[in-house]
Amino acid sequence: MNEVDLLFISAHPDDTELSCGGTIVRAVKDGLRVGLLDLTRGEMGTRGTPAIRKREASASARILGASFREQLDFHDGGLLTGPDQERELIDIVRITRPRLIFTPYPDDRHPDHTRAGRLVTESSFYAGLKSLKTKYDAHRPQATIYYIQNYQRPVSFVVDVTAAWKTKMRAIAAFKSQFHNPNSKEPQTFIARPEFIEMIEARGRHFGEFIGARYGEAFVTKQPPRVDDVIAAYRGREV
Ligand SMILES: [Zn+2]
């Protein structure tokens, strides 16, 4: 792991791609360093194995242009959130020193997403406490930003990912064992239905429409983002 500008943390491999893939591609193109961290290996998945998912996750990270992808072992299905996990995350925040952290909103259909969102929010704050001593210097990111998964909630801002959309979908397709594949003999799952990828496409179009773009990715923050150029913020909404 190295220092990054943006750190994307997910409960399971592929969560980040589905919700933030375009934002990552765009950030990398703009010269920012992006790191990916999966809190679990996705070992409870119906299809594939942890080894297959690890290979797929590495392939996806290369497509996105991430400078690293790490996987922790916080247990898929019953994600652990005790003091050991908190300390591990505090050190990762201190080593990678991100300016922003992206993570699931701490209330979602999958309890692992809820737990991940809460654990990451709290660890990010604690990482900035100078009197909390670990091997690494204290570091506090500017903010923790939440990406949208199953439950919908009021959007705080939308990133235009039109130019990045095809690359995002290629990154998602790298998870061959998880999503629709007509040749697969594995059991059907919620996310392996062809309708699931159609929903991701539709969601991108839906959020894009909010900002007058073809595709968008939406995010939620507990504090509103500062806007320095209000006119630019609404460019494209003239019609
Ligand atoms: Zn997940």
Image: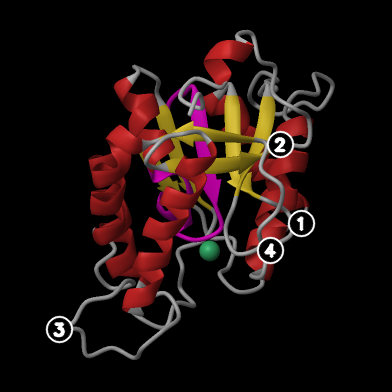
Of tags 1 and 2, which is closer to the observer? 2
In the image, which disc is placed on residue 183?
3
For disc 2, the marked residue is 221
Callout 3, which amino acid?
Answer: Asn
Highlighted range, magenta: 1-21
Mark 1, secondary structure of its residue: loop
For disc 1, the marked residue is 82
- Mark before the other along the chain sequence, 4 or 3: 4
Residue 54 against residue 34 in the figure, above or below: below
Residue drawn 23% across the image and 52% down it: 170
Image quadrant assignment for residue 151: bottom right
Q: Quadrant of the N terminus?
A: top left
Labels in figure, total: 4
Query: Residue 131 vs residue 110: left or right?
Result: right
Residue 86 in sight: yes
- Mark before the other along the chain sequence, 1 or 2: 1
Mark 3 residue crowding within 10 angstroms, few (<14) / some (14–19) / many (20+): few
Which residue is the extreme one toward the left? 183
Alpha-carbon distance for marks 4 and 2? 15 Å
Q: Nearer the viewer, residue 38 or 237?
A: 237
In the image, which disc is placed on residue 108?
4
Mark 3, secondary structure of its residue: loop
Alpha-carbon distance for marks 1 and 2? 24 Å
Residue 14 in sight: no
Quick check: is the Cβ at mark 3 less than 8 Å away from ligand 1?
no
Callout 2, which amino acid?
Answer: Thr
- Mark before the other along the chain sequence, 4 or 1: 1
